[in-house]
Amino acid sequence: MTLNVFWFLPTHGDSRYLGTTRGVRAVTHDYLQQVAVAADTSGYDGVLIPTGRSCEDPWVVASSLIGATRRLKFLVAIRPGLSTPGLAVRTAATFDRLSGGRLLVNVVTGGDQAELEADGLFADHATRYEISDEFLRIWRAALAGEGGEAGFDFEGKHLKVKGAKTLYPPVQKPHPPLYFGGSSPAAHELAAEQVDVYLTWGEPPAAVAEKIADIRARAARHGRTVRFGIRLHVIVRETSEAAWAAAEDLISHLDDEVIARAQTAFAKMDSEGQRRMAALHGGRRDKLEVSPNLWAGVGLVRGGAGTALVGDPETVAARMKEYADLGIETFILSGYPHLEEAYRFAELVFPLIGKGRQEPQTALTGPFGEVVGNGFLPKVAQS
Ligand SMILES: Cc1cc2nc3c(=O)[nH]c(=O)nc-3n(C[C@H](O)[C@H](O)[C@H](O)COP(=O)(O)O)c2cc1C
């Protein structure tokens, strides 16, 4: 199986250390472009762009990077309930056309009611999933051109459209692929019935296996199959010791008060996925290796994806293979800072997992390294 490997655009900030202003860098358009171009030229298949009030707007960010990239796909979020289905259909179709079919859509139902109320959506967890369900039925049908000339009619409990149609259809048929994450039973059911790729945050392999089995069983009841992906951080160094030292370094300026404040904020959310992430470490920094080479330190203060694969390249590749053997085809990875770590991961791990691309050689300065003694090429490294 060929793995899909994505990177992540840090639209809510980037740094060398967690929970401190030390080592931060400004997330400007120039910087996001550097990360996107690094991912594109290194051979990543795509980038995930997060959504929420802590992030820059993902559609504006993604649009601004179409021209700077060539093959990179953009996994961009839609939030059912925050826009009408018709508007979301048009945005997706236009993006897919202008990018030459490089749109992937991440459906985010949301797990923080206070944040959603601030955005104007007043709906509890169960209602939000009902809205997502209806929204996706309309979104998929309208993009696929159901209803023909007259357009598509739908009347649900929450959403209603009459004559919905797409005059400028998307490049990808019947519509750009739908990705989706969510760990509650309602989320699993939605994934089974309507989405193409189910995403999980980086839980231990046994827990991921259970989720995959549950979604596969539910999907079979709908006569469908679903593909699977995982979202993880990575801390890879040439030796295992250096990788674990880098993990410690990442939280070396993090104090207990900041951890406690972050965990209190996460506890107010109604996201089952977030609850499962927080339960892995319980707010304690002394038991962070929650499964071999799976480190929960990031989740002490970061919402959402809170675990990292830590180790030397061979170990991390082997852990990825463990997940792949469970059925995971897509890995959405990141590391701090996102620019350097995009290169580092590609350099160290891509050769072990059959990824990466060589650009046609138009420059004299690569990929052989710096010329030695002004006269000859460096020795070829034995791997
Ligand atoms: C890979 C992945 C990416 C996600 N990205 C976002 C995001 O960008 N913004 C957000 O608010 N929630 C995001 N989520 C959260 C889910 O969309 C979902 O709203 C949340 O898990 C609550 O659903 P649950 O209670 O069913 O777990 C993401 C989840 C996963 C697994």
Image (tube, rainbow, N blue to C red):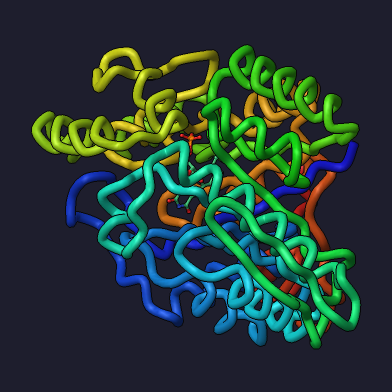
Q: Is residue 6 left or right of residue 32?
A: right
Where does the C terminus fall, quadrant-wise?
top right
Q: In this view of the protein, which residue sits in the foreground, 121 or 267? A: 121
Image: 344 above or below 378: above
Q: Position of residue 166 (x, y in %)?
A: 78, 80
Q: In this view of the protein, which residue sits in the foreground, 74 or 270? A: 270
Residue 116 appears in view: yes
Residue lying at 58% horizontally and 41% vertically, measured from the top left:
181
Q: Position of residue 291 (x, y in %)?
A: 51, 14
Can you tell which quarter of the image residue 248 is in?
top left
Q: Looking at the image, how many numbered discs can be counted on the residues?
A: 0
Where does the N terminus fall, quadrant-wise?
top right
Residue lying at 77% horizontally and 64% vertically, measured from the top left:
176
Residue lying at 51% horizontally and 23% vertically, measured from the top left:
294
Image: 364 above or below 311: below
**Residue most toward the left?**
257
Can you tell which quarter of the image residue 289 is in?
top left
Image: 347 above or below 11: above
Residue lying at 52% horizontally and 51% vertically, measured from the top left:
108
Q: Position of residue 319 (x, y in %)?
A: 66, 24
Q: Position of residue 109 (x, y in %)?
A: 50, 48
Q: In this view of the protein, which residue sits in the foreground, 271 or 288? A: 271
Q: Is residue 208 left or right of residue 377?
A: left
Q: Is residue 9 left or right of residue 215?
A: left
Residue 376 appears in view: no
